[in-house]
Each structure stands twice: as C-alpha cells, then as structure tokens.
Image (spheres, coloured by chain):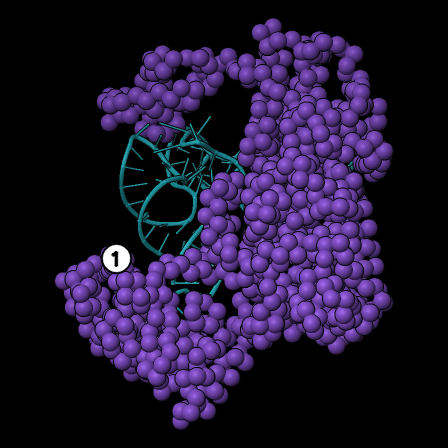
Amino acid sequence: MKDRYEFKEIEAKLQQKWVQQDIYVVPDSSDRQKYYCLEMFPYPSGKLHMGHVRNYSIGDVVARFKTMQGYNVLHPMGWDAFGLPAENAAIKHGAMHPAQWTMDNIDTMRAQLKQLGLSYDWNREVATCHPGYYKWTQWLFLQLYHHGLAYKKKSAVNWCPSCATVLANEQVKEGSCERCDSVVEKRELEQWFLKITDYADRLLADLKKLGGWPDKVKIMQENWIGRSEGAEITFPIIDGGTITVFTTRPDTVYGVTYMVLAPEHPLVEKLIEGKPQAGKIRKFVQEVRNLSELARTSTETEKVGLFTGAYCINPVNDEIVPILVANYVLVEYGTGAVMAVPAHDQRDFEFARKYSLPIRVVIQPEGVTLDPDAMTEAYEAEGLMVNSGPFSGMSNRRGITAVIKYLQERGLGEGRVNYRLRDWLISRQRYWGAPIPIVYCDKCGVVPVPDEDLPVMLPMDVAFKPTGRSPLEDHADFVNTICPTCGGPARRETDTMDTFMCSSFYYYRYTSPRNEDNAWDLDKVRQWLPVDQYIGGVEHAILHLLYSRFITKVLCDLKLVDNDEPFTNLLTQGMVLKDGAKMSKSKGNVVSPEDIVAKYGADTARLFILFASPPERDLEWSDQGVEGCYRFLNRVWRLVAPLGNILAVGGTPDRTTNLVGVNKDMRRMTHLAIKKVTEDVGNRFNFNTAVSAIMELVNAMYQYREVPECDRNAGVLREAVEVLLLLLAPFAPHITEELWALTGHEGSIHARSWPEYDPEATIEDEITIVVQINGRVRDRILVPADIKPDVMRELVMQQEKVQELIGDQKVIKVIPVPGKLVNIVVK
RNA sequence: GCGGGCGUGGCGGAACGGCAGACGCGCUGGACUUAGGAUCCAGUGGGGCAACUCGUGGAGGUUCAAAUCCUCUCGCCCGCACCA
C-alpha cells in the first residue's frame, strides 16, 4: 500500500507500460461492433494549447467509454502538417527548414499527447507533409481533374499580401485573411479551382441526414451555400446583344426602371466603346477593382453608379431601359447583372433616390395605393400585382411562377436556382504544401502527372527569402521537367494545394495508413467509415467540414468509398477562456498544459477540463478549480489505496433483497452512480455532471466508511470500489489503473467492461414527498416508494399540519404526482 | 440588417413543466495537530429571532405548478453580411 498519490511516478510508469503492451492498438477485424472516434488532428504549431487538451480529453473519454462498452474503437491521431507558419518561420529566422521545424514540433506535441495518457493507436499516425501521404493528396486532385471537377480559371481572387498567396472565399473573414488579419485584396489571376458548386444542392439537401450534428453548424453551412430560387431573364440591348439577369423576384419585372452591370462585367467595355462617357466609366471600374474585399462588399459603402449611354428593352412590356454600371452589383454572383426594381428592392430604391431614377410600383398590399414619390423605403413584402400587363390583379406569390412560365414560353427566360457558394480555390503560391501534380507543355498544353509518377516530390533544397515569390518558381530542377505525354520539355505547376485538401480525406487514410499502392483499402473504409463521432472546434463549421463533405460525395460518386457523408455525429467543443477571454500570448492569459501536467498530473488536468463545463460551451479556466480536482483524486486515493486487496473478501455483493440499512443504501448509491454516469457520458456527453455523480459516490463512500466495521458488508464495499474505479477510468486513466492493481486486480482496468446497474438496487423503500398548498411547499412526508396516487392523496389530507394550514379554506383540487409531490389547491 | 446562442448564488455550473442552486470552488465554524495554506466533520442565495417571505436579465401570458412553454423587451457572445 502506498499512502501518497504520487501522480508523476504513476503516470510515467503506466504510459510506458501501455506502450509496451500495445493496449491501444486496434485490430481491423474483430467480433466487436466498430466505433470510429475521431478528433480533428492538429497543426503542429509548436506545443499543445489548452484547446487541444480539451478536444483530446473529450475524445479520449468517448473512446475509452465505447471500448469498455464492448466496441472495437478506432481512435487515431496524426498531423495536419503542411502550412504557412513553418515556412514563415524559415523566412523569418532562416535557421530551420520548414520540414525540420514541422518534424520537431510533431515530436514535441506527440510527447505531450502521450503524457496526457490518450488512448491513440499510434501505429496509424499520419503526417500530411510526408511524401507517403501527400502522394495521395495529389492522387485525389487528379481524380477530381480527370472527372472534370478541377479546372484552371482566370478570375478576380482574394490575395493576402502578408501571406503572399491567394485564399479561398471560406478563408476570408470580414474582408480580412482569417489567418493573419491582413486586409485581403482582389487580384486577377489564373488559379486552380475545385467544382464544389456542382455539389451545392446535395451538400444542402444532405444536411437533413445529419441528425447528429449541431443545428448551429448545419445552419451555418446552409447560409454559406445560400440557395435562392428565381429566374434568369434576358433583356435585348438596343444596339445588339443581350443582358441576362438573375432575379428572385420575377413578379416585379414590370417595375424595372434601369439595369445595372457589375463594374467587372465583360459587357461593360462593349457598351461604352466609342461613347463619350467611356473614359469616366473605365476610371470608375478601375477604382472599384482596386478596392479591398471589405470596402467592395460592405453594406456601409455608398452606392455609386454611372450611365453607360446604352439601353436595353424590357421584354415583357417593350419599354426602353437605361443600362448603368454600379459598385453594388457583384460580378461573382448570378450573372453579374441586375434588373433594378427600386419600388421593391431596398438597394435599388436607395440608388434610384440618389440618382433621381424613376420608381414604379408593381406590387402593393390589397386596398392600398403606394405612391412612389411618398415612399421612404422599398415595399418588399407580399401583395397584388399592378401595372403588370396581363398579371395585374394577381397575387405576387402566384405571379412569380406565372411570370416564369410566361417568359419560358416566349424564350425570354427561365426558372433558375442560384447559390452563394463559389468554387473552392485551392492554389497557393507557397512552398510548404503538396505540389499540384500538373505539367505545362508547349505542345500538349496542360498535362496531369500520371498516377505512377506520384508523388511529385517537394524539393528540400530551396532558399527561403522574404521575396513573396514561391521558392519553387526559382527551383530549376523542380520547374523544368519532361512532358509525360510527348517527352518534350515542360514546366511544372509551382503552386501547392490548400491544406484543407490534405485534411479532407485523412480520416480515410487512417484506415490504411501505410498502404503504398492505394490511398486506402476499400474494405477497410467500408468497415470503419463513416466516423461515428467527430470532435473539434466550431471554427471549422464551414471550412474543413464543408470541404470534407464535398470530397466524400465525390469519392462516393467515384465508388472509392461507400458512405456519402463522412461524419455521423459531430461535437463542437467550446473555447478555453481565461479571465473571460480566449487565451492568447498578446493578452498574457495563457495557461500552459505542460505546467499543469507537471504540477498536478494528466489525470487532474483532464478531469478539470471535463468537469468545469459541458463540452460545447466555453470553459473558464480556474486554477482553484484545478486544485479542487486534484484534491478529489487525492481523496479517491486515500479512500481506496488503504483497502489493499479487496478481492480477498470473495464473492459478489449480496443481492439488494438481503441487504438492509446502510449497506442497502451504499449499494443503491453505487448503482445510481452507474446509471447516471452511463447516461451522461453515453447519451448526452455531459461529462461535467458525470464527474459530479462520481464525486457523489465518493462522498457516500466516505460516509459509509464511518459506519462501524461490524455493520458493514465487505461485498458492498468491494463493489463500490470497483464501480468507482471503472466509472472514473475514462476520465482519469492513470490513477484508476494504479488503484485497480493495488486493490488486487489482474490486467488493465481499461480492458474491463463498463459496469451495468441493477435497476432493483436503485429503488428506495421509502421516499420523501413534498406537500404543496397552492404551489408552495408546506410540508414533507415519508411514504412508501410504490405508493398509489390515490393513497398518496388520502395520506396527505390526513396530515395534521396540512389540515391546520387548510383551515376553513375550500379544497378545490388535489393533484398527486407519483414519486414527487401532492399539490392541494385551496380557495 | 439577417441567422444562431446565452443571461440562474461571491465564482464555474446543476435542475424529464413538479422541493431552484446537484457537484466543485470560495467563505464560516468545529475536530485533529507543535503547526496547518494538509485532512476530516458541519454550515453556506437574500431578508427575518421566528412563523414566513423574496428570488433564475425585465414585463406580460399559459398552467394546479414555469429557470424550463408562449409573446414582447433589454444585455452579452458567435456566424453571415449590397448574394439581386
């Protein structure tokens, strides 16, 4: 028996033992039902932070709990190892190659994860920067390319001047780079895109299948995809040609008083050519193009526009309509052109008022006549159509479909669905990423690298200079190559892939991490996928989670996987805060996991983080709270360690029927704890209340310990101890393993089955019920637990105190609630 | 502006529509000690000696009964933001 809880010694010893005995290695084939528990793999930024500790502590409880419940649990870990910080460090300090920097960080962080006692199968570890991994990132790109889902296009893209690379729309937050906060610029560049828009409808529709995802995340994705129904309408231009617009309000087409093109619209140049205002408009277009993303799209920006000098014809009423160019129309959305209906669109209204453009009412509420001159804002609500030719008098709701039908029949337009989602820009002008496996040949054009030539190796011998140019461009041996088709001289693509490409399939690779011939073994993917429980930060609600869903759907269509969604259940954990703010170096409120583990041990750190708050909520760090958890583990130690071998007492505890008094009570507490912890961990992921239930069990055991030994039942005590350790094992794996051995048990506690509760043991003979009069608690009485409602009612009414309190008031109603209370309504 | 979330003791947080505040922290008192910032025991929402009474951001409502359901409102946090 040891009298002190020496966490340092215990944790180090057991971590070593677990590795030696391979207890967390998962077999691919097993009689047990599969369970894939996955946490978002980290970027190896240096050291673990508390957010990681929280993420992985949650995952570890789930994995261990499911293992104890009899599942064959896949619980892997790896590294999202490509990315800018490694390269920036090389440029800034020059001393270390990004590969070295990354590998060093991985070593540090792996050691930290091991110190936390997390139950990963380390045999499956992957690092996305390893050629054996990024070969498959490139292969995935080629799969998309060969199926027309990867294409190169010149367009205005988001450019982060500080990161010296382009970004995907998803990586721009309020006009700034989500990584470094620099203001993002627009640049006209030729870049590689993935056709995620082809999957917009399915990505949206299948959100319905994701019952195990938080609504919040699904709503965010829904908004991001941004589906809207409407029509495309074609307006002939007087001097020839046409303008096509997208509108969600075809019912207002008779109210069009002008047309607006985005400044970047290709028609603009044609329309103004040779016209007197051409110079002014060119200047305006240039000004708008130079604006930052934020200034360009902000609702605050004043609406500015110019008349092109050209006119088109409204096809439904043959009216002549002027064509304008204005900054509030976005070239990327719809057709980049808008039919302006100032009476029924607030933006058009403001613009029309500013430039004194005509406003024509075509929808108004029944019985009301809207006066365009008197209107102070657009009327965007429902109503009856007016001034709308054959449609006048129709409800605008019906008008939407009627106008579409009318347009369609005359070849003037058609119904149309538009999405806000844009294609995924994956090119990055940076070195530390997976090279895009494409070759440019003067003769053959764009040539994909054949699968057998993969991986396209990232050269190691490059210079890192703060030029803003990718080092790959200056690496002659990399750039100059031979065309795989004709054998002639060719140049390699020097852009690398967005790291979200690397992380969009890693959960498949875990099933076959060392397979050199295929990205994965389909049989293994079939066996393990989809991921049963995915856990990570909500910051990936759109980015990683949307990309992964997209890639999974593509892979499913290509019959490379069977599942069409990757993650069945999703848990998004909250942030770890200190003093009400996110931990950050600049705020100086960072608590280092290393320090906490050194001072209190991994078990305490894990327990605190799980106890302090439910997982999806933000967690306020508290040094005193940590202290409390440390005290609790010491309390467990002092309770259990002195008992020594408890197996000697033999046998299982007596059935409840044979127990009385304190022994029966103790056994009930034990089984109630099993019930509560099983439900809290299994059904709701409320680890905080699960821990508090374990604390209550410990408190009850301390009480029980005060009972004279002659009155105690050794079997009851033994059961309580075993249950306590088993329930606590997923949370605090080291101390429970040590105490399991100290109390005489063979083998690892982590290989034991989760305890089941005996419903009979949880039943009390007598319970206290509350007596309410008019809803206020007035008395409590002890009654048999299985009392019938009628008996309850009678019993309560017989109480002297109750009679006194009622006095001469009239009893109107008596409501007995079995097991809880009786409410007497009097007047 | 639109969408989502959250408001409960001194603090973190508990409460299938049924005793508000489990559990932990902190605090108070006691025990054990040469000692206690260890440990164990007891107490701890406000007011009141008490019977009682007031209490879940605020105002209404539904109900025998509301932190919980409904309506309005205030405050904070997050996401999207000229998407036609």
Which chain contains the residue that carries disc 1? A
What tint does the image give chain A?
purple
Asked whether, in this view, residue A648 is left or right of residue A166, the answer is right
Tell me if I can see residue A372 in this picture: yes
Tell me the quarter of the picture where residue A246 sits.
bottom left
| Residue matched to label 1 | A397
Asked if A147 appears above or below A256 in the picture, the reply is above
Q: Which amino acid does label 1 sit on?
A: Arg
What tint does the image give chain B?
cyan
Residue that appears at 27% across and 66% down: A410
Image quarter of the C terminus of chain A: top left
Asked if A168 appears above or below A806 in the picture, the reply is below
Image coordinates for residue A426, horizontal then vertical, percent: 63, 62
Residue that appears at 58% across and 7% down: A657
Image quarter of the N terminus of chain A: top right
Asked whether, in this view, residue A44 is left or right of residue B7, the answer is right
Image coordinates for residue A293, horizontal then vertical, percent: 53, 72
Along the viewing direction, whichever of A497 and B11 lies nearer the viewer: A497
Mark 1 residue crowding within 10 angstroms, few (<14) / some (14–19) / many (20+): some
